[in-house]
Amino acid sequence: MINGKTRICGLIGNPVEHTLSPVIHNLLAEKYSQNLVYVPFLVEDAFLEQAISGAKALNVLGCNVTVPYKSNVIPWLKELDPLAKKIGAVNTLVLTKDGYKGYNTDMPGLLRAMKSDGVAVTGKEVIILGAGGVARAVAYLMAQEQAKKIWVVNRTIEKAKEIEKEIKEQYLHCEIEAITYDNLTCLEGNGYLAIQATSVGLYPNDDEVIVEAKSFYQKLEVAYDLIFNPKETMFMKLAKKEGVRAYNGLKMLLYQGIIAYELWTKTTVCETIIDEVYMRLREEI
Ligand code: ATR
């Protein structure tokens, strides 16, 4: 029930119409009987600074931040969590006395999703497909989790090389190499963990896939697509055809939300409720 004590959280982005975050947070608030409501805030580029100062002025408890503001929001924050600072991207804002503190819950979210799916990173050779904002953050996570070697694959090689350079500077012992899709045939052996971090295959382009070659999928042990709509992408289908375990990005979405909610409400969400939220998300797609 909305009353005088209701706290507000929301999503800052453009566009925001298709977000599933209100489903996550309003269900969590209901389950924990928290007087909290989560709403979308469509923010135009020119108003980002006012949106942040306005949210503070209106005592908004917390926000998620999505495309295209995960990096541009940083100058308007009072404090940055070290991980968010390192990655250079923020997806969660928490109200403090002076303004907002920015966090990145996408990467810990992906890590928790992988753990829950029984996917290990340490000591693995990892192939990241894509070199956009998401792929870059994934590269940081893989470096931090001590992957044996990271391959960053991108159509535009310069972007992959930038990630390679940055990671090498931050993680001195990390082995990382930028390549194009043509070079995938050069990868030797098998047992790779592949993370699909491009937008190729996203609804409504369900039939598109970033790599078609059967020989690529035969080298994998696990295929992780960060896309969650459709539930089973063409990337996952091709991987499964070769007997490879394949997962979509819905659990990453789930856990980034759980971690954000825990930051806002200073609570720990239990496994039973996490499962319920996951079921609800599956129904929503
Ligand atoms: P995000 O923030 O979601 O990572 P982005 O920064 O726009 O989004 O990155 C999108 C990624 O998908 C990039 O790696 C992009 O490759 P380029 O850097 O070469 O543009 C990749 N991508 C998108 N469409 C693609 C396509 N048709 N073929 C190959 N790569 C594609």
Image (spheres, helix red, strand yellow):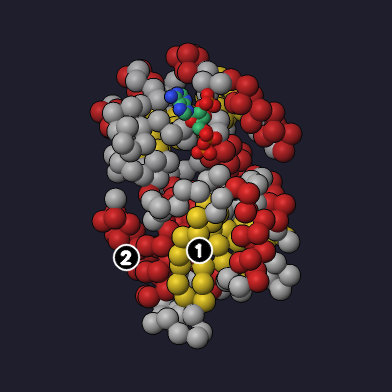
Q: Estimate the x, y position of residue 2 in percent, counting from the top left.
A: 42, 81
Q: CA distance from mark 1 to mark 2?
A: 21 Å
Asked if ligand 1 lies within 8 A of label 2, the reply is no
Residue 116 visible in this rendered orientation of the protein: no
Query: In the displayed structure, would residue 60 be above or below residue 125?
Result: below
Q: Estimate the x, y position of residue 273 in percent, counting from the top left.
A: 36, 69
Q: Are marks 1 and 2 in contact (CB under 8 Å)?
A: no
Q: Estimate the x, y position of residue 160 in percent, counting from the top left.
A: 60, 26
Query: In the displayed structure, would residue 21 be above or below residue 110?
Result: below
Q: Earlier in the sequence, mark 1 or mark 2?
A: 1
Left or right? Give the position of 227 relative to 172.
Answer: left
Mark 1: which amino acid?
Gly
Disc number at residue 124?
none
Mark 2: which amino acid?
Glu
The crowd level at tag 1 (other Cα within 10 Å; few <14, some 14-19, many 20+) is many
Residue 176 visible in this rendered orientation of the protein: yes
Left or right? Give the position of 112 relative to 170.
Answer: left
According to the picture, the residue beneath numbered tag 2 turns out to be 276
Residue at 39%, 82% in the rendered image? 1
- SS at mark 2 in the image: helix
Residue at 67%, 64% in the rendered image? 53
Q: Estimate the x, y position of residue 215 in percent, counting from the top left.
A: 35, 17
Residue at 52%, 51% in the rendered image? 13
Query: In the displayed structure, would residue 81 be above or below residue 227?
Result: below
- SS at mark 1 in the image: strand
Between 40 and 106, the one lying in front of the other is: 40
The crowd level at tag 2 (other Cα within 10 Å; few <14, some 14-19, many 20+) is some
Between 4 and 181, the one lying in front of the other is: 4
Residue at 62%, 54% in the rendered image? 47
Number of on-image labels: 2
According to the picture, the residue beneath numbered tag 1 turns out to be 10
Query: Which marked residue is nearer to the observer: mark 1 or mark 2?
Result: 1
